[in-house]
Image: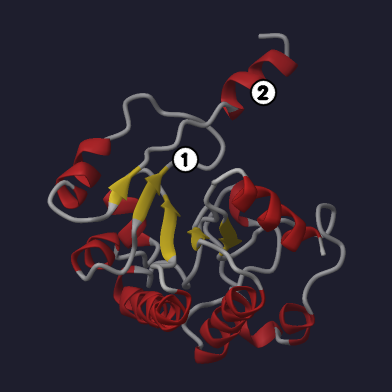
Amino acid sequence: QPLQALLDHSHKRGMAFIAGFRMNDTHGRAHFPVRADFVESHPQWQLKDMREGDGYQEGFPLDFTFDEVRDFIFEVMREVVSRFDVDGLEMTFRDPMYFPHPEGGNRAHLMTRLVRRIRGMLDEFSQSRGRRILLGARVFSTLEECLDMGLDVSTWIAEGLIDHLSPMDTMFCDFNAPWAEFGALTRNSPCMLYPTLNQWTSRRMRMRGE
């Protein structure tokens, strides 16, 4: 199995293997013509009312308001941890919607409930494997944006739910991003802060000859 081969290679080299999970996806069928049956078969659990702008119009993003959606994501992550000896999981929140706009802030407790559940599941496997299985998160580059989308990062850190945090922008790099506000949350906690530098904008500019 490809994933097991990567795990074996990483462990031989003394490297940690963190399995990444994109928590939602707004790519259209041109990118991914075939999707999980759960997504295809339950349009009632997909986000309908998108924000304005091209970046919000494609795909079949799931609405984390529903228990069934959160259960589905949890079970996929649990299956990976149960089948493979991963060193951790990383939740990648790179897509711009998880709840109907503008309800993200009001429903952040639902996402936090899922993060707590994932942390609890990892703690169970950690006991049997004799080491802490890590949980990380890639989030948007300001706390305001995160909370607007229903990602209560400060609570995740305060409760010790995540081991590392990587604030980032999805498709470009802002060298003036306010990383300090994240640092204020992680400085006195076990959670490590790893700001992410994205090269996409410079690459896109080169492709256009600018």
Judge whether 127 appears above or below 208 on screen: below
User: Which residue occupies 60% across, 29% down?
Assistant: 200
State which tag comes first along the sequence, 2 or 1. 1
Residue at label 2? 204
Q: Position of residue 67 (x, y in %)?
A: 50, 90
Q: Position of residue 174 (x, y in %)?
A: 41, 28
What colouring style does the render use? secondary structure
Please name whichever residue, 79 or 168, is drawn nearer the observer in this view of the structure.
Answer: 79
User: Which residue occupies 81% across, 52% down?
Assistant: 31
Crowding around mark 1 (Cα neighbors within 10 Å: few <14, some 14 to 19, many 20+) is many
User: Which residue occupies 60% across, 80% down?
Assistant: 82
Element at label 2: helix
Determine which quarter of the picture holds residue 126. bottom left
Residue at label 1? 169
Q: Position of residue 86 (x, y in %)?
A: 57, 64
What's the mark number on residue 142?
A: none
